[in-house]
């Protein structure tokens, strides 16, 4: 992979020891014939009041049966939870293999886009054991959030002062998802976010990711403004163009639409999000594939939902798999 913007690959796929916060976040749509699943596998370090916290978030949405399995699991901090040396095999490990909330991510140093991802958890509501065994291969260049991979701002461009963020949006994925004793062969093109650096201790945000059938991949988000139905929100979008190399960063407007869904945690989410991108002649509608896709948490619930998208971009009708994320909880401490 090439060295682009503020992101250096393969080096920046590895742990940044000077970053207070870092996570690798796999999401997307997987299919088994006509059956559709959404998933998330996240391994993360967050720092609060000088204390390091490790945790995983793992979920599976069975769209046909409208069942959502999820778990957030805390782990004791150890410095060797992820590999920082780019001459070594890239790996991220939380928990013991097969354990509740366990995550293992691994790739050779010669091709960090060729990942083996394993994860497991027990859903607390149904007591169902869920396991993932996935192989992924990135195709094409990464999407650089903000167009450069580093948040706008002043001061040094390093992880102690800025937020760094890029995504592998063309991961050819195959493997198995196990629900209880049933192993299901799945495939799809999935998405990984790698984010590290300086994060605020508490913030709200909404995010929409799309993999359009014309080859365009995009991510739009807005922060620090709780969404309200039918109220437009000024925001931004990063777009990876059809040539697989061009990254656009431009203004957009996100408008939450009905229906709304209120979780047992007492948080109301909008399950349909409309994204208007005037510079790209784009109007896209994101629709959650199931109302209840919330991670329950004693700290701050967060909505992580598999979705679909349809609409227009550059005057062309488009559609595809998508993702809706909303961190609106009372503390909104990131994915924790």
Image (cartoon, rainbow, N blue to C red):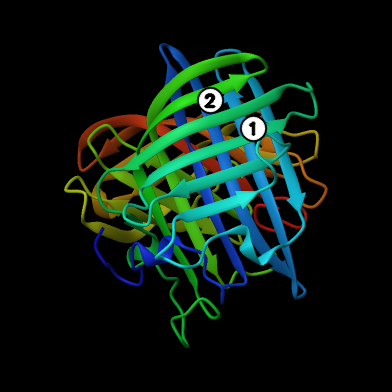
Mark 2 element type? loop
In this rendered view, identify the residue nearer to me: 119 or 25: 119
53 above or below 95? below
Write the residue at 27% across / 67% down: 4
**Camera sees residue 138:** yes
Mark 2 touches mark 1? (CB < 8 Å): yes
Q: Residue furthest front?
A: 88
Q: Is residue 200 above or below residue 211?
A: below
Residue sitting at x 65%, y 38%: 97
Check disc 1: other Cα within 10 Å, few if <14, some if 14-19, many if 20+: many
45 relative to 223 in the view: left or right: right
The spot of residue 281 in percent (x, y) is 25, 46
Question: Seen in the image, is 204 located left or right of residue 34?
Answer: right
Q: Position of residue 196 (x, y in %)?
A: 53, 65
Q: Residues within 10 Å of mark 2 (few under 14, many from 20)?
A: many
Q: Quadrant of the N terminus?
A: bottom left
Tell me, for residue 289, which label it has, or none. Answer: 2
Q: Position of residue 299 (x, y in %)?
A: 80, 52
**Closer-to-camera residue (27/288):** 27
Q: CA distance from mark 2 to mark 1?
A: 9 Å
Q: Nearer the viewer, residue 208 or 160?
A: 160
Q: Where does label 1 land, which residue?
A: 293
């Amino acid at each position: 992979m090439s060295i682009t913007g503020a992101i250096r690959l393969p080096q920046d796929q590895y742990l940044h020891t000077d970053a207070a916060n870092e996570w690798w976040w796999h999401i997307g749509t997987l299919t088994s014939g006509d059956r559709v699943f959404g998933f998330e596998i996240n391994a993360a370090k967050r720092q609060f009041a000088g204390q390091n916290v490790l945790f995983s978030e793992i979920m599976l949405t069975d769209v046909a049966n409208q069942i959502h399995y999820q778990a957030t699991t805390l782990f004791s901090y150890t410095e060797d939870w992820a590999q920082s040396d780019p001459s070594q095999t890239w790996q991220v490990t939380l928990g013991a293999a097969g354990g509740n909330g366990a995550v293992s991510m691994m790739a050779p140093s010669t091709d960090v886009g060729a990942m083996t991802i394993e994860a497991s958890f027990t859903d607390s509501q149904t007591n169902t054991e869920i396991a993932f065994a996935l192989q992924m291969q990135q195709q094409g260049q990464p999407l650089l959030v903000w167009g450069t991979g580093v948040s706008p701002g002043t001061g040094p461009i390093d992880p102690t002062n800025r937020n760094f963020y890029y995504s592998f949006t063309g991961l050819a994925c195959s493997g198995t998802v196990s629900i209880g004793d049933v192993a299901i062969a799945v495939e799809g093109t999935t998405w990984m976010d790698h984010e590290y650096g300086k994060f605020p201790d508490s913030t709200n945000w909404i995010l929409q990711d799309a993999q359009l059938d014309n080859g365009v991949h995009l991510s739009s988000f807005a922060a620090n403004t709780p969404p309200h139905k039918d109220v437009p929100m000024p925001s931004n979008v990063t777009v990876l163009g059809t040539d697989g190399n061009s990254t656009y960063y431009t203004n957009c407007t996100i408008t939450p639409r009905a229906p709304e869904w209120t979780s047992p945690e007492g948080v109301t989410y909008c399950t349909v999000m409309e994204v208007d991108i005037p510079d790209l002649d784009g109007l896209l509608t994101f629709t959650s594939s199931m109302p209840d896709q919330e991670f329950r948490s004693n700290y701050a619930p967060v909505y992580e939902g598999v979705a679909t998208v349809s609409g227009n971009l550059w005057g062309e009708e488009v559609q595809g798999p998508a993702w809706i994320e909303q961190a609106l909880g009372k503390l909104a401490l990131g994915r924790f």
